[in-house]
Image (cartoon, coloured by chain):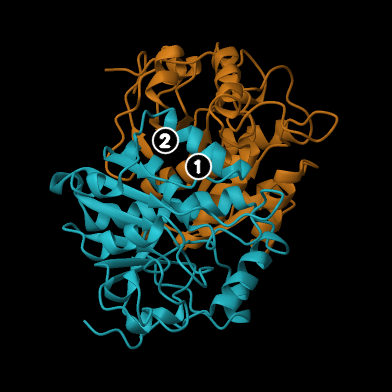
Chain colours: A orange, B cyan
Amino acid sequence: MALRVLSAKSSAALDQELMSAGAFSIDQLMELAGLSVSQAVHKLQPLNKGRRILVACGPGNNDADGNCPAGPDAQTGGDGLVAARHLWHYGYQPTMYYPKQSKNELYQRLTTQLHALDIPFAQDFGAALAQTDHVVDAVFGFSFAGEVREPFPAVIAALAAAPVPVLSVDAPSSWDIERGPPPDGPGKAFHPQALVSLTAPKPLVKWFGGRHFVGGRFLSPAMAEKYGLDLPPYEGIDQIVEVPVEGQKL
Amino acid sequence: MALRVLSAKSSAALDQELMSAGAFSIDQLMELAGLSVSQAVHKLQPLNKGRRILVACGPGNNDADGNCPAGPDAQTGGDGLVAARHLWHYGYQPTMYYPKQSKNELYQRLTTQLHALDIPFAQDFGAALAQTDHVVDAVFGFSFAGEVREPFPAVIAALAAAPVPVLSVDAPSSWDIERGPPPDGPGKAFHPQALVSLTAPKPLVKWFGGRHFVGGRFLSPAMAEKYGLDLPPYEGIDQIVEVPVEGQKL
């Protein structure tokens, strides 16, 4: 059975509701989202298959005050920052690519937490890509719309040609949330090996043919019902579950 | 090899440092601490052995402004609130006993998150204890000192005589952090089956003879070295690890 999908607009509304009526803080939700991402990496890339993980983080999406205007799912870069910390604790060797660092206070703290672990920050994405076993694409998430700004066109082109597996967070970066791969530009040929959808799959999964995980184990049945979603069939204490998706072509 | 222990005073200093130089928010740390507690429950009480978990939460430890003066380890009640939410998502049936509800904003939000899952709050601890398969003791943690105030003396006496296993968080409630079981009072006879120490074991483990877990997988090597601690030998993606402890008598 395929899980139902959540539009970009509804995803933003659900995030806002989690943080208002749901009483979650963005710190909490991002911690759990990043933890889910780290568990998906562990599933895809066991420690004995190579420990070097390149985590590419987007600029975040801040308003003029440096606040996160939308919730954790919109903040894909932050999910990558949290995931990298957990990966380090699991025994991986993460390297960050985070060229446009957010002034958002939470993002800055998450970055400090990585510096405390001496996790390196790469300047040259291509060079970093040549020295890794796996990539986490946390560049653009479900709030992405419009154009891919510098320096990310080259990053997405490199991801599309990556010699190692790529796990995208919420969306293959530069894909349209409703319409999937862009008709042209660097993302046209970008088909990552795996995707982890946070809270719920987005409509773009219709165009996605790789392994698909859902994470973010905090949705209440009442919220799922309100947004027309399924509670994913998580097992045990896992924060992620691998799922088939309607329209998925393998 | 036994893990080194952390005094009450050093525990408070470490928590403060995690939140200042370490750049963690209390929301983040408490989420990870409560997640650790939930994983210890899952290890001790697999779902097929009975799903009813009674979570007893203490009053928290707030200053006049309702802020948490110390960190997540001091806030044992909050760890219980977080753990209960995760336990619900794993498929357990948690019941809360939380008679002195904190006005602290984080505690209030964590409580709202439990109400959203329709988790019941019991008024009568004895009655709740007669209808559960397992207990989480998140009444008093490492910041406990002095006297046990109402209604907790009867709660601790009931825990000491509980017909089901009890997991204590950071300390068997009412135990002195440095000197172990109190010489008299309801806690004298309280020897829970299991203990989960957050961040590091406290000196009281010398008097503890049950199963012992360490949780809170966020300590950096630099912080561990500064405080004379070991990084616990966590495995895989686990947030807890079962450990022997110096002086532990089984």
Residue for badge 2:
A217
Task: Residue at 72%, 49% (x, y): give it.
Answer: B65
Q: Can you see residue B61?
A: yes
Task: Residue at 24%, 67% (x, y): give it.
Answer: B193
In screen coordinates, is B12 left or right of B160? Answer: right
Label 1–label 2 contact, CB within 8 A: yes
Q: Callout 1: few (<14), some (14-19), or many (20+) C-alpha neighbours within 10 Å?
A: many
Same chain for mark 1 and mark 2? The answer is: yes
Vertically, is B154 above or below A73?
Answer: below
In screen coordinates, is B35 left or right of B243? Answer: right
Which residue type does callout 2 highlight? Arg
Q: Can you see residue A53?
A: no
How many numbered circles are shown?
Answer: 2
User: The residue tagged with tag 2: helix, strand or loop?
Assistant: loop
As measured in the structure, the alpha-carbon distance from the residue carrying label 1 to the one carrying label 2 is: 8 Å
- Percent x, y for residue B228? 56, 83
Q: The N terminus of chain A appears in which quarter of the rendering? A: top left
In screen coordinates, is A230 left or right of A89? Answer: left
Residue for badge 1:
A32
Which residue type does callout 1 highlight? Leu
User: The residue tagged with tag 1: helix, strand or loop?
Assistant: helix
Depth check: A210 or A230 in front?
A230
- Percent x, y for residue B134? 23, 52
